[in-house]
Image (cartoon, helix red, strand yellow):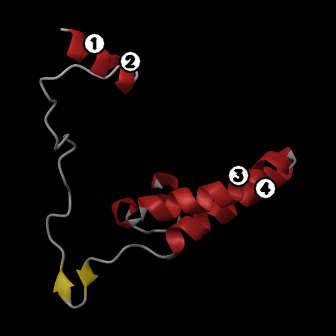
Amino acid sequence: MWSAGTTYATPPLRLSLQGTRHHLNNFIPELLAAASTKRQQIYRTLLKVIAHKPVSDACGGKLRPGRSEPRVRKRRPKAYPLMTKPRHELRKQLQSA
């Protein structure tokens, strides 16, 4: 994404991560099958496709400030152990205790 943005004068932070993954997955078979000289041309085409449509700052006329989100887990771990045996065995164990 950084290479695509800097090569084609698009701010790299305005490029879509999911769009980049989608295009990369589509280009992988061509890149693997191509010869060394052709691979560079395909790579440049990939960068152009990635940089072609940046994500806008506006959505329906409203600005989208502060779109960076913290990378944290929302769910808190439970105090119970993980289920490591089949449910029917655990039920038997619970009933016999």
Instruction: Give the number of the mark in front: 2 or 3.
Output: 2
Instruction: Give the number of the mark in front: 1 or 4.
Output: 1
Which residue is disc 4 drawn over?
Answer: 30
The picture places residue 3, in percent across and down from the top left corner, at: 51, 54
C-alpha separation, residue under disc 3 versus residue under disc 4: 5 Å
Q: Quadrant of residue 74?
A: top left
Amino acid type at circle 4 is Glu
Contact, CB < 8 Å: mark 2 with mark 1? yes
Residue under the point 53% across and 74% down:
52
Q: Quadrant of residue 96?
A: top left
Amino acid type at circle 1 is Gln
Give the secondary structure at mark 4: helix
Instruction: Give the number of the mark in front: 2 or 1.
Output: 1
Vertical order, 84 against 69 (above or below) = above
Q: Which mark is residue 93?
A: 1
Q: Quadrant of the C terminus?
A: top left
The picture places residue 87, in percent across and down from the top left corner, at: 35, 26
Which residue is disc 3 drawn over?
Answer: 28
Which residue is disc 2 drawn over?
Answer: 85
Q: Of marks 2 and 3, which one's residue comes earlier in the chain?
A: 3
